């Protein structure tokens, strides 16, 4: 018999979101009349916007003609889309050939982990999007979790109320891979430009590479806050950025994202990281869907940008409602002002216990903070991606937590 991949054997438990779905199903089976509302996983619910939909339909029709049919495209994405991302979203801060189009940032994070492999120190914010840790374990960069839930080989950088949910940079490992997400999933905290400049400086001093996850950048309302790490001087020598159309234009199901690998970024010895990323993408990825890429192009046209901004504003309206609803119940929360997630504090309580209580009393699904890391204990996350009427109803039901 073939032995099980020891890296997989090191994984502690199932992935967070299927576990939440399993608990939701179990509750529904026991309470068939309950109308459960999900403010759990960050899954978009609004339809695709009209301009983008029109362009997708036109693109599908073209594919149905001999003249308009295309098969495989460049693995790195359509040249036109790469140029538009560089121009419209980065204002020329990155070059088109540094943009690698993909089927989403989560998938790119997995492929990046393959590129870095095992045997390197990894640092994550704690709490963090679970893919950073679980993917690192699968890639062989970590050993089994101890009794405290922390994997060996991973440096957990506590992000707690006392430090404004921004980690202590002195704790960055030497020559390591550092994950940083801003606007943050799950806390909703957003790094200022000055803070990111400190991160870049520390990464340079320690020989680290940062994977900067900017999937929620379009949710930044404050114009002073940076949407990309490449707004910071020096980032081109120490950072990779991943981003996605999922949350900005509702492409969670359409699937489209991108990764920026600057040409200055180099390995020890000087060889360019971008060359290896290109090798990986051309080997195990066959390019993003040609239809999805046409949708991405439409989303970056002026009309698509206006529609996307309205969509984001709509979800942020949900975030405002949730924030007010939590405050009305005396539940302290942060986030939700420049991010679609609210991080609600239940000090001294277990996150899963609070998750169960909200599910049982309010029939509302949230995400337990401890699922994002040990420092998430005592919190639950509310997502603003529900339908408006569901958010209104869910917020109204929070009053049941009082009794
Ligand atoms: C979430 O945290 O809810 C996830 O971000 C969903 C996703 O993978 O995008």
Image (cartoon, helix red, strand yellow):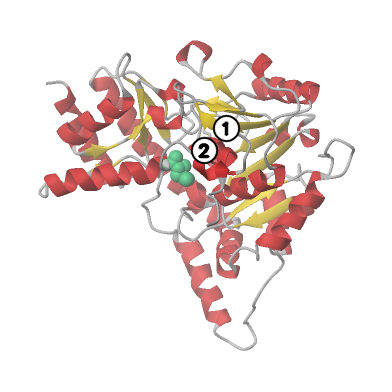
Tell me what residue is drawn at x 67 percent, y 52 percent: 85
Horizontal arrangement in the rendering, residue 213 relative to residue 341 (left or right):
right
Horizontal arrangement in the rendering, residue 132 relative to residue 32 (left or right):
right
Q: Position of residue 13 (x, y in %)?
A: 41, 38
Nearest the viewer among 33 and 16 is 16
- Quadrant of the rendered structure where residue 180 is? top right
- On the rendered image, what quadrant is the C terminus found in? top left
Instruction: Name the residue that disc number 1 marks.
Output: 143
Residue 228 in sight here: no
Tell me what residue is drawn at x 49 percent, y 31 percent: 338
Give the Cα distance between marks 2 and 1. Answer: 6 Å
Question: Any mark on residue 10, and which?
Answer: 2
Location of ligand 1 given as a quarter of the image: top left
Local packing at callout 2 (Cα closer than 10 Å; few below 14, some 14-19, many 20+) is some
Element under disc 1: strand
* Residue at the extreme top of the image, as rendered: 162
Nearest the viewer among 99 and 249 is 99
Element under disc 2: loop
Horizontal arrangement in the rendering, residue 289 relative to residue 280 (left or right):
left
Local packing at callout 1 (Cα closer than 10 Å; few below 14, some 14-19, many 20+) is some
Q: Closer to the N terminus: mark 2 or mark 1? A: 2
Nearest the viewer among 391 and 269 is 269
* Residue at the extreme bottom of the image, as rendered: 66
Tell me what residue is drawn at x 11 percent, y 50 percent: 32
């Amino acid at each position: 018999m073939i032995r099980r991949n020891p890296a997989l054997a090191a994984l502690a438990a199932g992935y967070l979101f299927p576990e939440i779905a399993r608990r939701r199903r179990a509750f529904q089976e026991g309470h068939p009349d309950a109308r459960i509302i999900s403010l759990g996983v960050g899954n978009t619910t609004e339809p695709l916007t009209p301009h983008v939909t029109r362009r997708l339909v036109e693109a599908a029709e073209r594919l149905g003609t001999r003249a308009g049919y295309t098969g495989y495209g460049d693995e790195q994405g359509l040249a036109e889309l790469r140029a538009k991302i560089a121009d419209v979203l980065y204002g020329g801060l990155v070059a088109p050939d540094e943009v690698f189009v993909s089927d989403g940032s989560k998938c790119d994070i997995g492929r990046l982990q393959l590129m870095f492999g095992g045997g390197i120190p990894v640092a994550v914010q704690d709490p963090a999007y679970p893919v950073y840790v679980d993917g690192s374990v699968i890639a062989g960069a970590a050993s089994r979790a101890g009794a405290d839930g922390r994997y060996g080989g991973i440096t957990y950088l506590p992000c707690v109320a006392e430090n404004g949910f921004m980690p202590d940079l002195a704790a960055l490992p030497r020559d390591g891979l550092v994950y940083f997400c801003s606007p943050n999933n799950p806390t909703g905290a957003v790094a200022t430009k000055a803070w990111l400049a400190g991160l870049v400086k520390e990464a340079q001093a320690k020989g680290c590479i940062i994977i900067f996850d900017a999937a929620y950048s379009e949710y930044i309302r404050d114009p002073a806050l940076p949407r990309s790490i490449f707004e910071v001087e020096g980032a081109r020598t120490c950072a990779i950025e991943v981003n996605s159309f999922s949350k900005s234009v509702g492409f969670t199901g359409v699937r489209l994202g991108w990764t920026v690998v600057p040409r200055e970024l180099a390995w020890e010895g000087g060889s360019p990281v971008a060359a290896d990323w290109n090798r990986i993408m051309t080997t195990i990825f066959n390019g993003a869907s040609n239809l999805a890429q046409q949708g991405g192009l439409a989303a970056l046209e002026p009309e698509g940008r206006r529609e996307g901004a309205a969509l984001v504003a709509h979800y942020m309206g949900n975030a405002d409602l949730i924030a007010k609803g939590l405050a009305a119940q005396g539940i302290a929360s942060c986030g939700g002002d420049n991010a679609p997630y609210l991080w609600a504090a239940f000090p001294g309580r277990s996150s899963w216990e609070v998750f169960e209580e909200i599910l049982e009393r309010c029939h509302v699904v949230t995400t337990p903070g401890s699922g994002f890391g040990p420092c998430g204990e005592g919190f639950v996350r509310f997502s603003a991606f529900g339908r408006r009427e569901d958010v209104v109803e869910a917020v109204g039901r929070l009053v049941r937590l009082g009794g």
